[in-house]
Image (cartoon, rainbow, N blue to C red):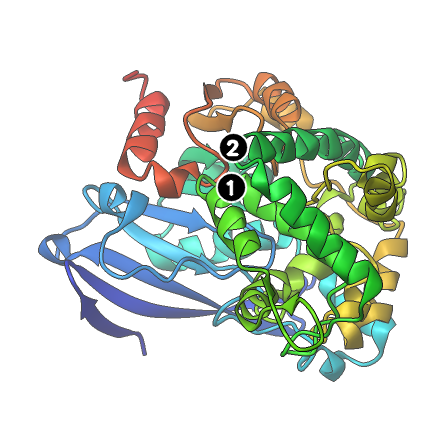
Amino acid sequence: MSLSYRQPGVVLTDRRFTVPLDHTDPAGETIGVYAREVVASDKAGQDLPWLLYLQGGPGFGANRFVGRPAWLGRALKEYRVLLLDQRGTGHSTPANRQTLPLRGGPAEQADYLTHFRADSIVRDCELIRREVTGGAPWTVLGQSFGGFCTVSYLSLAPEGLAAAVITGGLPSLDAHADDVYRAAYPRMERKVAAHYARYPQDVQRARAIADHLLQHEVTLPNGYRLTVEAFQTVGILLGGGEGSHRLHHLLEEAFVPTPNGPELSDAFQEEIQGLLSYAGHPLYALVHEAIYGQDARPTAWSAERVRAEFPQFDAAKTLADDGPLQLTGETIHPWMFETDPALRPLRETAEHLAARTDWTPLYDSARLAANEVPVAAAVYHDDLYVDTAHSLRTARAVRGLRTWVTDEFEHDGVRAGGPRVLDRLLALTRDEA
């Protein structure tokens, strides 16, 4: 039975669905998928079209909104919204260090996780759509990885879509993970340079933290081993609109004086462990590179291998050369499965995934070239997480797709820009802009 309840200005309904683990075996094992229905209080009894929201990630449940913030308020003017916890996330059947051993050993766990990519998510959506809308097509809003899923949706089941809106999530249709990261590291350098130009005092602060970590073993309160490489990954903050400012505040309170000399403060350690831990979203680490797997080539820890092509990211070399410390972001490395207690039990599972050579295509170029679904995409100029050139090449490959290329927002523009971003994109799908 579905449970409905209220928050300011909205009525929420918990929706739970049962879907096949493997959609090629619909009579086989099943898993649970959760979604939260949201409708404006004054429209609760109306027959409204549906908008499905696909969260970024992979590995994150849908936003837990209170009321009608960000883009949601605009959507609720005309839609009944479904906030989907993609399989393995949120209230859906979980996949983490505690539950995955139920599958068996690392090889069996890796086999299980191959069913947690965009193609399986899209097929979940199609089963859910038929149950929720009675078969009517719906509009999809895909943010970041949710946009990747939306392009898979256009490839696999365009008949289920009335329109598609993508924010910061147009993937390359054919790039290997190596291509993705070769484009990403120079982009990261640009973001770091811009941060240091804004906050020049942070150059020395970041170097001091790196030097401390090279000379001391630091274990955070949650058991995370803070290495210099782990510290460098706080660069992921620079992909958000407020990220540079958040990074600055983190760095400015890093050290406190103690009888044993300067040490990393409790406040710094508390904040950085929240930034670095994958306890709340382990699928992000486990399947992140798998979202780029589409052929017989293994991903083989692509971000780590490609990083070696950029020696400026070597912290020890940077300190010896008296240069600014480079930071990283949106990359997963094998050492994370040693430093993070939430990932340590899953190291062998991750190795199996990195070695797989049987990935299947996620996108259908021919079908996209013949697309008839109205599609609009926000492409953020120099987006840290999704390469702009890759996105624009894909935009040209999808028939009828209209783009809004902007440097007004970072990757989280649909949150920061809220109603204005969604309004602009919906207008593009209707030829109103």
Q: Residue furthest left?
A: 42
Q: Quadrant of residue 115?
A: bottom right
Residue denoted by label 1: 244
Mark number, residue 198: 2
Mark 2: amino acid: Arg
Quarter of the picture containing the N terminus is: bottom left
Give the percent coordinates (x, y) of residue 344. 78, 74
Q: Is residue 336 left or right of residue 369?
A: right
Q: Quadrant of residue 264?
A: bottom right
Look at the numbered discs 2 and 1 and tell me whether their residues touch, using CB distance below 8 Å: yes
Mark 1: amino acid: Ser
- SS for dot 2: helix
Examine the rendered structure and indicate whether residue 259 appears above or below residue 152. Answer: below
Disc 2 packing (10 Å; few <14; some 14–19; many ≥20): few
Give the percent coordinates (x, y) of residue 116. 66, 59
Residue that appears at 73% across and 66% down: 226
Counting residues from the start of the chain, the first of labels 2 and 1 encountered is 2
